[in-house]
Amino acid sequence: MTPDQLEAALGYRHNFARVVRAAPERTELAFDLDRERYPWLALPPLHPVVIDKIQYFAAVTGSLQASQMKPGTRSALTKLTWSALVPPGDARPAVRGVLAPWAGEERAGYELALFDDPGREVARVRGEGTAFGDRDFGAWRAAAKQKAADAARDRAAPTPPADPVAAGLGPGGVCLVSPPRGRSLAALVTAESGFGPAHPFHTGSGDHVNAAHLFDCAMQAAHLLWEPAGTALHCVAGEAGFLRFVELGVPFEIDVAEPEPGPEGTTRLCFTVRQAGRENTRLRFDLAPLDS
């Protein structure tokens, strides 16, 4: 595909994923680890933002290979789960993946296994989604954006910490999240500051706040609420349920439930993202200090 065709399909002029071998039941992919093209590779290999980027390229590339993306059809990710299979301190970047699609009566998705250069399986990802006709997508999105903006018209934008490092936001924090009020934080992602080149780790369609933005914000929220303050965290497993788009340029809230014990000594944090009085996204991260 030409760069223009890739940009139309992926939102990028280059493809991080390359098909090595394809069959109806599985697609083998190789990944491009060029950090100039993909600055988010500077994040820890199992950071939720990295997991989201890889699954996005893998899933879309696999669908293109299988000719499952028909003209006029749009798709939306509705659920994503993932887990690390190696200790974070021993994690290396994923260099290849194996994508296995599945389909049910009402939903479809994929299983994705990620492997590092020595051949170890480092993570597993499962995505679920839905496909729908265009339905005058532009008009529908314009109305949704305006409704969210109207609902938040009298709300002040959140004020992020003046010093993200001192606030303990961890690697990749971009000052999108305000200091907490109890266990609630205000956040804002704008079209101007939330995408490259203004932001090194986030790109995409520019239509809405994407999953990687939300994962970034949730990791910031976790760092701001964690005790003791300043602790660097890694995420060993997670789950995300996407109910509706979060709109750009409109403040949203991140409510963080009280921590619970997670598997293998981790701490589980659950996040609810709300915008304009409606629930948009539910997240669950299993976290531990980076040096544990």
Image (cartoon, grey):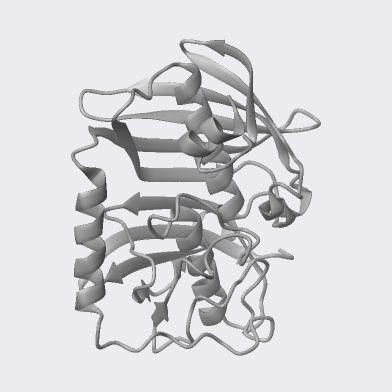
Q: Is residue 149 left or right of residue 169?
A: left
Which quadrant of the rendered structure holds the N terminus? top right
Q: How many marks?
A: 0
Residue 118 at x, y = what percent?
81, 31
Position above or below: 262 against 81: below
Give the residue at x 21% y 28%: 106
Residue 91 at x, y = what percent?
74, 47
Position above or below: 96 against 252: above
Give the residue at x 22% y 32%: 133
Q: Is residue 221 left or right of residue 137?
A: right
Q: Residue furthest right?
A: 118
Which quadrant of the rendered structure holds the C terminus? bottom right
Q: Is residue 58 visible?
A: no
Nearer-the-camera pick, 284 or 7: 7
Position above or below: 81 against 107: below
Give the residue at x 34% y 59%: 282
What is the quadrant of residue 206 in the picture?
bottom left
Give the residue at x 50% y 55%: 212
Q: Is residue 137 left or right of residue 126?
A: left
Residue 71 at x, y = what percent?
33, 25
